[in-house]
Image (cartoon, grey):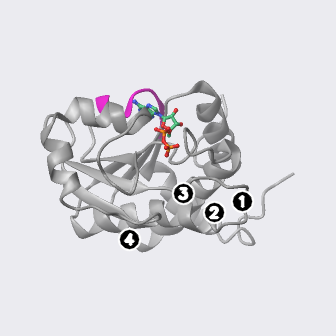
Amino acid sequence: MKLDTTSAGIAPGSIMADLAHRIRLVLGDITSLNVQAVVTAANESLRGGGGVDGAVHSAAGPDLVAASRQLAPCQTGDTRITPGFNLAASHVIHAVGPVFHGGNSNESDLLASAYRRSLELAAAHQLPSIAFPCISTGVFGFPADQACVIAIDTVINWLPKNQFPETVTFCCFQATDHSLYCDRLIELGMISEG
Ligand code: ADP
């Protein structure tokens, strides 16, 4: 079945084709990416955690936790920005996604907000490139398939209206997530099959 992108709140075909060159999909460790802004899946205390946040903090070095703690607390759905310290990325965007409590606690809106607020910070700092992990889908328990749709749709709604960031990378750490993103991006005409 062909996806009706208009009813999904997504731009029509011609705009989608223009967007394709601004979107990338990779399987791997986000800390190794050569982008201006790496997004980490943080918690409200911004003290560092496990998963992707642990990897980002260990690659950036101890200055990151000192910088991020000064910006705490950060409410769920919101973001903060710090330097990237020892990362190749010049900035880290700390995005606090929701803990999944079954789906009736505004989790979808809060997850979309975490992505949108990250994009807003990248735009405010005129950062050309940003990479997202699959926010909330680890310890926070958000179903990966639903989170994938929210992540991609939020980015696709942002890009046509904004010059920055110029490119957005979805960085999946697990092959199962990569496959979900791949299917969704093919469905939207952002990447081709094969
Ligand atoms: P949350 O608490 O928001 O659920 P997690 O860090 O537990 O955050 O998981 C979020 C996602 O980050 C998961 O899909 C996990 O596979 C992924 N992840 C873990 N380590 C890395 C990494 N080094 N690079 C990119 N993604 C990662």
- Mark 4 falls on what kind of element? loop
Q: Where's residue 45, x and y in %?
A: 33, 54
- Mark 2 falls on what kind of element? helix
Q: Which mark is residue 98?
A: 3
Please identify, in this view, whether the residue under mark 1 or under mark 4 is nearer the observer: 1
- Circles 1 and 3, Cβ within 8 Å, touching? The answer is no
Q: Nearer the viewer, residue 101 or 24?
A: 101
- Mark 1 falls on what kind of element? loop
- Circles 1 and 2, Cβ within 8 Å, touching? The answer is yes
Q: Which residue is mark 2?
A: 108
Q: From this view, report whether residue 15 is shown above or below residue 167.
A: below
Q: Which residue is mark 1?
A: 103
Badge 2 residue CB within 8 Å of ligand 1: no
Question: Going 14% across and 34% down the picture, which residue do you hit?
Answer: 86
Task: Count neighbours of disc 1 (C-alpha within 10 A) and say few if under 14, some if 14 to 19, many if 20 or more.
Answer: few
Q: Where's residue 165, x and y in %?
A: 33, 59
Q: Which residue is mark 4?
A: 162
Between the residue at mark 1 and the residue at mark 2, the CA separation in whole angstroms equals: 7 Å
Tell me which corner region of the image, top left, top right, bottom left or bottom right, holds residue 56.
top left
- Mark 3 falls on what kind of element? loop
